[in-house]
Image: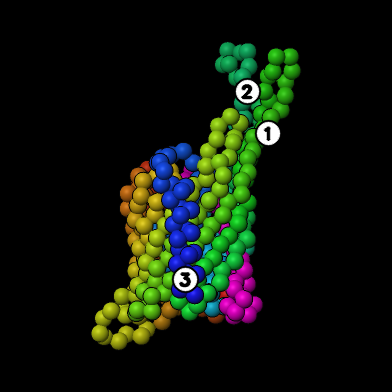
C-alpha cells in the first residue's frame, strides 16, 4: 500500500511539472470562472481547502477529501454575485452508499451569468457602427467525480469536467453577403487529488492538480484552462496545547498554489468552532492584486449547514456569498 501511495504522489508531481515547470505563461489562460470561489466557507477561508473535507463541495477543491465524507448523501448549493454583477451559482451532490467501503461518487455544476450586453456591428454611418441585439454571455461546467480511501490515512480522488462558454452571435459583412457567426467554445478537463493523514495530532497533507486539459482554440487564438497545482496542510491548534477544551476547536489551513496564469501565492484560513455547530472564519490571500482578507460564519443544525462570507475588494465592490448544505 505504501508503494502505491508513493506512485500516486509521483504521478501527480510529474503531471504538474510537465504542465507548468517548462515555462511561465502569465495572464494567458481562459475560462477564469473556474478559479472563482463560489462556496461561502471556502471564500471565508481564502480558498485554502486542499486538506478540508467539504462533502460534495470537495469536487471544487480537492476531490480526494470527499473520500472521508461521513454522511450517506451530501448536497450543496451556493450563490455568489461576483465583480461587475457577474452571477456564479454552484451545485454539488455526493453519494456514499456503503459508508466509504466502495468510495464516494459525486456530481458538480457551475453556471455563470455575465448579464446583458449590447451587440453592435460595423456600419457605413457617421458613428461607424449600429446596434444589433442584446445578448447574454454565459458559461457552465458539469463534472463527475470519484474518491476512495485506500487506507485509514491515504485517500485519492479525481474528476472529469465538461465546460463551455458562449458569447452570443453577430452579423459579419462578407464581400457579397451578410452571415451570422456564433461565438462559443468548450473543453474537457481533469482534476486529481490526494489526502494524507499523518496520524500525528490529526495533521493532514494534501495535493491537487486542477483543470488539466489540452489547449483550446477560439477563432484564431489558442489558450489553456487555469491549471493550478496546490499543496496544503491542516492542523487543529487545540491538539498542541496541554489544556483540554473539547468543545472548542481552532483549525488552521495553509495552501501553497502554483497557477499557470499568476505567480505563486499562499492562502491562509483560520476557523474557530464551538461544539462543531457554530463557526467563525478568517482568510488571507497573499500576493493578490485585488483582494486579501475575508471573513465569515457558519451554523450547523439537524444536518443542515448555512455558511456566509464577506470578501474585501480593493477596486470593485466587496463580495458576499451564501451557501446551503444538507447531509443525510
Callout 3: 10 Å neighbours few (<14), some, many (20+)? few
Which numbered marker is on residue 182?
1
Contact, CB < 8 Å: mark 1 with mark 2? no
Q: Position of residue 237 (x, y in %)?
A: 31, 75
Q: Position of residue 87 (x, y in %)?
A: 55, 49
- 54 shown above or below 161: below
Coloured how? rainbow
Furthest residue in direction left, as rendered: 242
* Residue positioned 56% across, 68% down in the render: 147
Which residue in the structure is indicated by mark 3?
A: 3
Magenta span has 105? Answer: yes
Q: Position of residue 309 (x, y in %)?
A: 43, 61
Marks 1 and 2, the one that precedes in the sequence: 2
Mark in the foreground, 3 or 2: 3
Secondary-structure class at tag 1: strand
- 42 shown above or below 200: above
Which residue in the structure is indicated by mark 2?
A: 121
Given residues 82 and 234, the one toward you in this image is: 234
Secondary-structure class at tag 2: strand
Q: CA distance from mark 1 to mark 2?
A: 14 Å
* Residue 43 visible in the shown view: no
* Residue positioned 61% across, 54% down in the render: 161
- 194 shown above or below 88: below
Q: CA distance from mark 3 to mark 2?
A: 61 Å
Secondary-structure class at tag 3: helix
Furthest residue in direction front, as rendered: 3
- 179 shown above or below 62: above
Callout 1: 10 Å neighbours few (<14), some, many (20+)? few
Given residues 143 and 121, the one toward you in this image is: 143
Contact, CB < 8 Å: mark 3 with mark 2? no
Start and end of the magenta stretch?
A: 83-106
Amino acid at each position: 500500500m505504501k508503494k502505491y501511495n508513493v506512485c500516486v504522489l509521483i504521478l501527480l508531481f510529474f503531471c504538474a511539472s510537465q504542465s507548468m515547470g517548462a515555462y511561465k505563461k502569465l495572464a494567458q489562460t481562459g475560462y477564469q470562472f473556474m478559479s472563482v470561489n463560489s462556496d461561502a466557507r471556502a471564500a471565508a477561508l481564502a480558498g485554502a481547502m486542499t486538506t478540508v473535507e467539504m462533502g460534495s463541495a470537495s469536487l471544487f477543491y480537492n476531490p480526494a477529501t470527499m473520500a472521508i465524507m461521513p454522511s450517506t448523501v451530501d448536497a450543496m448549493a451556493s450563490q455568489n454575485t461576483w465583480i461587475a454583477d457577474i452571477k456564479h451559482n454552484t451545485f454539488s451532490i455526493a453519494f456514499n452508499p456503503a459508508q466509504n467501503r466502495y468510495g464516494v461518487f459525486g456530481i458538480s455544476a457551475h453556471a455563470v451569468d455575465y448579464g446583458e450586453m449590447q451587440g453592435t456591428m460595423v456600419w457605413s454611418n457617421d458613428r461607424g457602427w449600429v446596434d444589433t441585439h442584446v445578448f447574454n454571455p454565459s458559461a457552465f461546467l458539469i463534472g463527475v467525480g470519484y474518491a476512495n480511501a485506500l487506507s485509514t490515512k491515504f485517500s485519492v480522488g479525481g474528476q472529469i469536467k465538461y465546460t463551455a462558454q458562449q458569447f452570443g452571435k453577430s452579423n459579419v459583412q462578407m464581400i457579397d453577403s451578410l452571415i451570422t457567426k456564433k461565438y462559443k467554445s468548450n473543453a474537457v478537463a481533469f482534476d486529481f487529488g490526494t489526502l494524507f493523514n499523518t496520524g500525528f495530532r490529526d495533521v493532514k497533507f494534501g495535493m491537487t492538480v486542477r483543470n488539466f486539459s489540452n489547449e483550446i482554440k477560439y477563432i484564431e487564438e489558442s489558450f489553456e484552462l487555469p491549471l493550478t497545482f496546490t499543496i496544503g496542510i491542516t492542523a487543529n491548534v487545540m491538539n498542541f496545547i496541554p489544556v483540554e477544551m473539547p468543545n472548542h476547536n481552532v483549525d488552521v489551513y495553509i495552501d501553497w498554489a502554483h497557477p499557470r496564469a499568476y505567480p505563486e501565492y499562499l492562502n491562509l484560513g483560520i476557523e474557530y468552532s464551538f461544539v462543531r455547530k457554530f463557526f467563525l472564519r478568517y482568510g488571507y490571500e497573499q500576493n493578490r492584486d485585488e483582494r486579501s482578507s475575508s471573513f465569515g460564519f457558519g451554523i450547523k443544525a439537524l444536518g443542515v449547514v448555512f455558511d456566509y462570507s464577506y470578501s474585501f475588494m480593493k477596486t470593485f465592490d466587496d463580495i458576499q456569498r451564501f451557501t446551503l448544505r444538507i447531509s443525510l
